[in-house]
Structure formats: C-alpha cells, structure tokens
Amino acid sequence: MNQLPIHLVVNKEDYHLFVKPNRVLLDVLREDLELTGTKEGCGLGKCGACTVLLNGRPVHACLTLALQVDGCEITTIEGIGGEKMHPLQEAFVDKGAIQCGFCTPGMINTAKALLDENANPSEEEIKQAIAGNLCRCTGYNKIVDAIHSCGCQSKKKKGGIK
Amino acid sequence: MRIRPFDFKAATSLADALNQLDQAGSNARVLAGGTDLVLNMKKKNILPSMLISLHPIKNLEYVEEKNEMIHIGALAKHADLAIHPILEKYVSILCQAVGLIGSWQVRNIGTIGGNLCNASPAADAVPPLLALDAAVVIATLHGEKTVPINSFFCGPGQTVMKPNEILKEILIKKPLKPSAGCYLKLRRRKAVDISLAGVAFQAESDPSGQRIEQVKIALGGVAPTAIRVPDAENCLVGLSIDDAFQKIPMCADKAANAAKPIDDVRATADYKRTIVNVFVQRCAQHVLTTLKNYRGQS
C-alpha cells in the first residue's frame, strides 16, 4: 500500500503530505498535523465529535478518507478564533455549554457553519443543525442557548452598522 | 478503528473511472461520498482491494432542467438537493426525503448516487424516486443505458449494475399538471437514524384541480427493496378530491397489506405494517389538502 501525495489547506495553512489510502482525515489531522482538538468519539459517523469543516461545511473526519479531500480547505477547532476566542466559543463558556468538553470542538464547528449560513437561526433550526452532534453532559439546552445568543449578537451587530 | 489496507486511484473523469474499474477487477469499489462505504470498511463488512475515487470529477454534481426532464448528477450531495430550487419547484418530495438522510455532516458529503448504489431497502431517496417514476442512467464501457428505477434494485444491497459500471445520473419527468408529494419516515431517534419505514406519496390532479388523475405510493424499509403499491394507488385514481378524502382509510389498508416487513432489531413486522397504514393516511391527507388548496388559488 503506497503512500500517495495530497495537498490540504488546514486552517488557512498549506500542507503537502504523503498518506496511505486507509487513513481517514481524522488520523491525519491528529497524528500528522498534531491538531488534536478534533476528537474521535465513535469513529462510525454517529456522534459528531470529529466534525470539521470541509470547504466550510461540517463533515465527519472519521468517515472521510484523507485522499478523498485532496485540494480541499479544512477548518478544525484550532482554526476558529485566533488571539481571542471566537464569539461562539465565548458564548459556550458564558452559558455553561461545556462540561467535559469532548463534544465541544465538533459542536462549535457545526454551529459556526450554521451561523455562517444563517446569521440568526431559530431554536428549531439550531436543533436540526446539531442533531448529528451528541453531548452526554449538558442535556443540550445550554448549547442551544449559547448558539442562539451568538446568533442574536450577530444580528445586533448588523443592526448597529446600519 | 483501522481500515484494512487497499489501493487507491483517483479518477479524473467518468471515462477514466470506467477504464480503471474495468482493469481493477471485481474486488474494486467506487468511492463517492464514502459515508457508507468507509463505515463498512471500518466494520470489515466490505474489504475491497482497491477504491476508485470519483472525488476529482466535478461535473457530476448538477441539477438541470432540459425540456420536460430534470437531470440530477450522481455526485450531487444530499444537502444541496434538499434545498435545490428546481427540485423544490417540481418534485419537493425528493427534497423532503434527502433532507432526512443521516445528519447534516452526512448530507454534506453523501451523494444521491451513493444512496442508490448502496441499495439499502431503507434508503430515503428511493421511495420518492419510485413515486416519481424516475430512471437512472448507467455508464458502461460501451456507452450509456437508461434503467427505470423500479427495475434497478434486485434485493438488499443489490442492483442490476455490473461491477464495472457506474451510475451517472437520475432522470425525473417534470409534472405538467398540479402535483404534490409527501415523504414521511419513522425513526427511533428524531435525527441521524435509518428509517424503520418510509412512505412516499405523490399525486397529480387534472389541470382544473377537480379530479385525481394519478397517485403513486412507494414504501421503503418494509420489503427486500422499496416497493410501489398499485392496489392502494388505484383506490384514489379518478376520484374527485373530496371523494378521495373518504377513501384514504381503504387506500392505507391496501398499502399496509402489500407491505412485506420482517421482524428485526429495529421493530416488529406488525409495528412496521401499522406505521405504513398511519403514514399513508397522513401523507394522503397532506397531499390532497395541498391539491385542494391549489384549486382554491386558481
């Protein structure tokens, strides 16, 4: 099984790598790029802990072969926010939406993709979007609250500019 | 969870994919989104010697109107189809169904072609396509062939496609008269679960919106492949919309009787049959009400 070349843009940085065909994106992110923010939960595409953004859209890094995303842009939790936390991350902290934290990277990625698509989602839309992200600690209410408050904030900001 | 080693080839075009697949032999598989194939490789249910990946092929993700037909490229992703304006306008039943597949993460990379080729009896895209009398175009080394969707599936996980063929596109005839459709699916979880039973109900009235001219009902998850239920459909065809409402219970009974569910880990056969009955009634109510409202508007 030969290693094959791929080019990935992860968190806006270029990576030229050689990977074996049987490695999923999750392994390459965690082991080769040492971006261990992305978690492996079930490894079977059910829990959403491994959610990363592929060209801006949430996907399971555990079910996506690395070679399959050659040339694509990937965002992991390390690429969200910068010097300061992203407003979503702040909202998760403020609202107590993090307990053990294992689901949080995937949850934030899904939420970010939702807010990028729909700046002010309804509670129902938030629940639909995060349906594929399991959290065994919080009971989801605080997560939904956090995403909702962030949506409201971005609406306020837009209003302010006008 | 590790995947057994295999060789990997990226196809640059459909023709290239067909050639590579033909040379690779029968233990090679085609990779589209991979949400099911990679999962089954992890579980060691499928152990291919080679994957031919279609990911570099960007011109198979289209949805196009050409004369009276809608063409959907096999690599179109569920998330895009679920909100596609052409599909929403003509065949919203398909948008409803693909929007219920898996999770958002799965819909963002999973493809409609993959959903069909995987041939799960519970695949959500299949009952609406049956109810829309769709056809699929299969690419072979010697050209293309068109197969009606009702003769595409042979059994659970089996289609009429040979190992060296690739699904290219799906064809749906645009409804020319007032039409409405509804897809309902039963799951144990509200999201991210395969369907225990799915009911697709598509109906067309005459241009004045008085009489039901065509009814197509398809059931998923309650037989070795998704099935149409002509006896149930015929209960409503030719009736005025108001009379059709009265016949809904009879139609639902016939659909439930035609279902051949089995007891399995998810539910008993009796339960699935009951659900088919209830869902056909709900779908019919919704569709007939929509058609009646069209009449009100015209």
Image: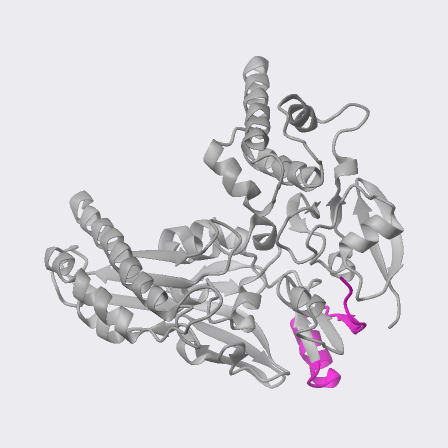
B93 is higher (above) or lower (below) than B138: above
Residue B63 coordinates in the image, percent (x, y) = 50, 58
In this image, B236 relative to A66: left or right? left
Residue B5 coordinates in the image, percent (x, y) = 81, 72
- In depth, the one of A42 and A122 nearer the eye is A42
Residue occupying the point 64% across, 55% down? A45
A30 is higher (above) or lower (below) than B141: above
**Residue B131 visible in this rendered orientation of the protein:** no
**Quadrant location, the N terminus of chain B:** bottom right
A144 is higher (above) or lower (below) than B289: above
In this image, A59 relative to A16: left or right? left
Residue occupying the point 58% across, 20% down? A153
Q: Tell whether position B138 is magenta.
A: no
Q: Tell whether position B11 is magenta.
A: yes
Residue B78 coordinates in the image, percent (x, y) = 53, 56
Give the colour scheme of this rendering: one colour
Residue A31 coordinates in the image, percent (x, y) = 87, 51
- In depth, the one of B155 and B14 nearer the eye is B155
In this image, B58 relative to B248: left or right? right
**Range of the magenta residues?**
B1-27
